[in-house]
Image (tube, helix red, strand yellow):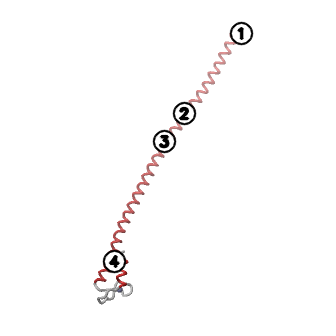
Amino acid sequence: MKERNFLDRVMEFEQELESMQKQFRELIGFVAQMTEENHSLQLENHHLRKRLEDMDKQIEEQALAKTQTINVRQHQKKPNKIDVGEGVDNLARLYNEGFHVCNVHYGSSRKGEDCLFCLSFLNKQNV
Ligand SMILES: [Zn+2]
């Protein structure tokens, strides 16, 4: 009776050990799975960070290119403004040389007389 009880307890203990071993294996499997997942997440994170940096660089380069384009446009605009100024200067010189620059008599001689149309036109251009 006492022996039988002891044997039962040993067998019970063996079952508990098996159960614990099974749980332990599951735990190890879980840890392995988590480690693998963590590794792949780190890889993905690394790739995403690199991509983000590349995109930041691209955006920076595009912004720089835009600024340069605007600078080029501004440089191109300046000569245009000068052209307009030169055009007005030419008209003023033409007027001072005695010719009409107004729409009414453009190109014809003023015959030494001031023309209100010309003066008004030149004043408008200088503004
Ligand atoms: Zn005139």
Query: For this view, does 12 lie left or right of residue 102?
Result: right
Q: Are marks 1 and 4 in contact (CB under 8 Å)?
A: no
Where is 94 relative to 22, above or below? below
Mark 3 or 4 closer to N-term? 3
Is residue 90 shown left or right of residue 52? left
- The CA span between labels 3 and 1 is 63 Å
Numbered mark located on residue 43 in the image: 3
Q: Which of marks 2 and 4 is in front?
A: 4
Secondary structure of residue under mark 3: helix
Q: Mark 2 points at which residue?
A: 32
Query: Residue farthest to the right?
Result: 1
The residue most toward the left is 97
Q: Which amino acid does label 4 sit on?
A: Val
**In-front residue for pair 58/102:** 102
Choose the circle earlier in sequence order: 2 or 4: 2
Q: In this view, does 66 lie above or below 14?
A: below
Say which amino acid is labelled 2. Answer: Ala
Q: Residues within 10 Å of mark 1 (few under 14, many from 20)?
A: few
Number of numbered discs visible in the structure rendering: 4
Query: Where in the figure is residue 22, as x and y percent of width and height?
Result: 61, 27
